[in-house]
Amino acid sequence: MGARELIGAWVWLVVLSAMTTALTLFEPDGDGRIAVAACVLALAGLKGRVILSRYLKIGTSRFWTSAFDIVLGVFLALGFAAYLIGTGGS
């Protein structure tokens, strides 16, 4: 991996982490909490995709990119479902 790719991946991870941190500053009620939780999980998925595609160079293979996207999506969906069950859905 070249220095430019490494720095680009690092910048993306910093930006996505800053966005996650900014979301934690909100204290909404009801459906707002669910939306914030969904956004935090979506940002976690994006960070995972950056790490997989850039650092592990999975982005060069269409098959492995699709496979890991599916696995990551299912994992995040299960995490969101567990959050909804734990909060009673509201």
Image: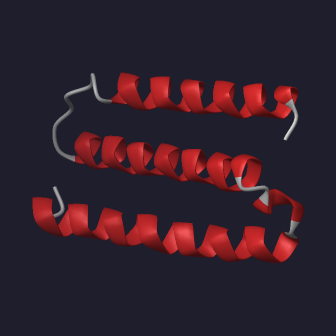
Position in image of residue 55 (x %, y %)? 71, 48
Q: Nearer the viewer, residue 63 or 81?
A: 63
73 horizontally vs 60: left or right: left
Q: Nearer the viewer, residue 5 or 81?
A: 5
Q: Nearer the viewer, residue 62 or 77?
A: 62
Specify how the rendered protein is coloured.
secondary structure
Q: Which residue is at a point 86% across and 26% down the rendered structure image?
A: 4
> Image quadrant of residue 81?
bottom left
Q: Is residue 88 visible?
A: no
Task: Classify the position of the C terminus by image quarter.
Answer: bottom left
Q: Nearer the viewer, residue 66 or 64?
A: 64
57 horizontally vs 31: left or right: right
72 horizontally vs 8: left or right: left
The count of marks equals 0
75 horizontally vs 48: left or right: left
Position in image of residue 67 (x %, y %)? 69, 77
Seen in the picture, residue 70 relative to 46 is either above or below; the reply is below
Q: Is residue 63 visible?
A: yes
Q: Which residue is at a point 84% across and 41% down the rendered structure image?
A: 1
Q: Which residue is at a point 84% across and 27% down the rendered structure image?
A: 3
Position in image of residue 15 (x %, y %)? 58, 25
Position in image of residue 85 (x %, y %)? 17, 69
Seen in the picture, residue 89 relative to 74 is either above or below; the reply is above
> Image quadrant of residue 69?
bottom right
Seen in the picture, residue 68 relative to 12 is either above or below; the reply is below
